[in-house]
Image: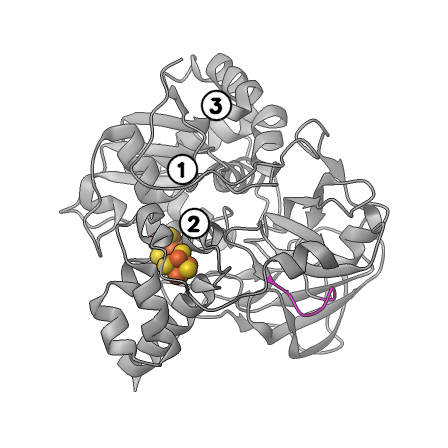
Amino acid sequence: MKKRSFKGGTHPPAKKELTAKSPIAAMPLPEEVLLPLSQHLGAPAKPLVKPNDRVKTGQKIAEATGFVSVPLHSSISGTVKEIAELPHPTLGVGLAIRIEGDGDDVWDEGTKERANYSGLTPKELREIIREAGIAGMGGAAFPTHVKLSPPQEKPIDTFILNGAECEPWLTADQRLMLENGEGILEGMRLIMRTLGCQKGCIGIETNKGDAIKNLQKLSSAYGYEVIPLKVKYPQGGEKQLIKAITGREVPLGGLPMDVGCVVHNVGTAYAVYEAVAKGKPLIERVVTVTGTIVKNPQNLRTRIGTHFAKLIEECGGTTETMGKLINGGPMMGIAVETDEVPVIKGTSGVLALSQKEARYWEPRPCIYCGRCVDTCPMGLMPNMIGNLAEKEKFASAKEYGVLNCIECGSCSFVCPARRNLVHLFKYAKAKLTQMKES
Ligand code: SF4
Ligand code: SF4
């Protein structure tokens, strides 16, 4: 099997064996959900409901506030209890709608299957995808309809379905490719129709041989090519995936559409299928709940808005006191302050670390070894940018390319001083955005 890849990157322990063989289990209906208005990149959604309103499952409860924004739907039926600053898995706190469930799961009348969707135009498909509130489910949460609206002067000739799932510990995409392969490929077909694109490729790392085989078998009817990729982090980064599959280099500061490509994660393709074929907005997703201290790690299909604490509880709790809880995986994930934070559209994993594992990641001063420079897949100098960000020299950090950082975490992973470089880069980027806006 020929394996393709990219330059740079690293090889963290995969740790996928804990959940790779466990079928996706359905999480019980939550008693309450917290639905943050900011679950996607871009402008937060604006509430359409108020406290004490009754809502149904799949009902639109907040509307998009611009082109780069998506609406939000209730993931259970019940009563709106409050709209307030509540725990958020990436922002710490954020404005959210709290809904108390009635336990009945009564669906909104608008969520109906489409008997025939073959005649829908690209414009109609794009509108359905936007109205379903779909944002990239691999973690970036970029509004999907925006990526499906390239300008005329940038035609797309290749669509790449991202099944790499290079983030250690996580297996939600692998299980989805095994258990919902038909829906994923139908979603891919709809995405390609929306883009007017003829060539479809599916990139999967070779440590998911079962998923490769399944999609190879299913995709022969569609004429898509399944491409086995070398197991290397961050193989699932958009730019790295495009390089490995097409040989094209996305220019620094550029986008995949600059080289005729669009990339979507397998979970996003499945959500597109559900929105178009079943009329179902994005109200649930698959989450890998894992860690050596989790009693029964597994993949759970859960409603958006479910508290992390409930997911851990569903997995039997932990065998010892938790040292750190992470939204996502160990490389790109973010530590959360409380297990009361909810699953949002971009939550692919919940990782519980022991106190000993958490201590291992405590940072120390830089020893100037240069390992971070050798490993950066974007050819940056993470040590230098980290030092500049720490000294609040943001303009200089920009000159050294902080805005080209894809936040993959490879530099932090190889750093013997355990420097939390990604945290510094996120901080510098946020400050540069503020400086631009002011
Ligand atoms: S500097 Fe950014 S892109 Fe480079 S390794 Fe670090 S996190 Fe990844
Ligand atoms: S790997 Fe860590 S210790 Fe080595 S140069 Fe980079 S930041 Fe400094």
Q: Which residues are magenta?
A: 335-340
**Quarter placement of the C terminus:** bottom left
The amino acid marked with disc number 3 is: Thr
Q: Earlier in the sequence, mark 2 or mark 3?
A: 3
Name the residue at 37% across, 42% down: 9
The amino acid marked with disc number 2 is: Ser
Residue reaching furthest to the left: 153
Q: Which residue is mark 3?
A: 206
Specify whether residue 274 is in view: yes
Q: Earlier in the sequence, mark 1 or mark 3?
A: 3
Q: CA distance from mark 2 to mark 3?
A: 20 Å
Q: Position of residue 238 (x, y in %)?
A: 35, 43
Q: CA distance from mark 1 to mark 2?
A: 11 Å
Q: Which residue is mark 2?
A: 410
Q: Which residue is mark 1?
A: 235
Pointer 1 with pointer 3, Cβ within 8 A: no
Circle 1 or circle 2, nearest the eye: 2
Q: Is residue 172 part of the magenta span, yes or no?
A: no
Pointer 1 with pointer 2, Cβ within 8 A: no
**Closer-to-camera residue (96/131):** 96
Left or right? Give the position of 280 relative to 438.
right
Quarter residue 226 falls in: top left
The amino acid marked with disc number 1 is: Gln
**Quarter placement of the N terminus:** top left
Quarter residue 140 falls in: bottom left
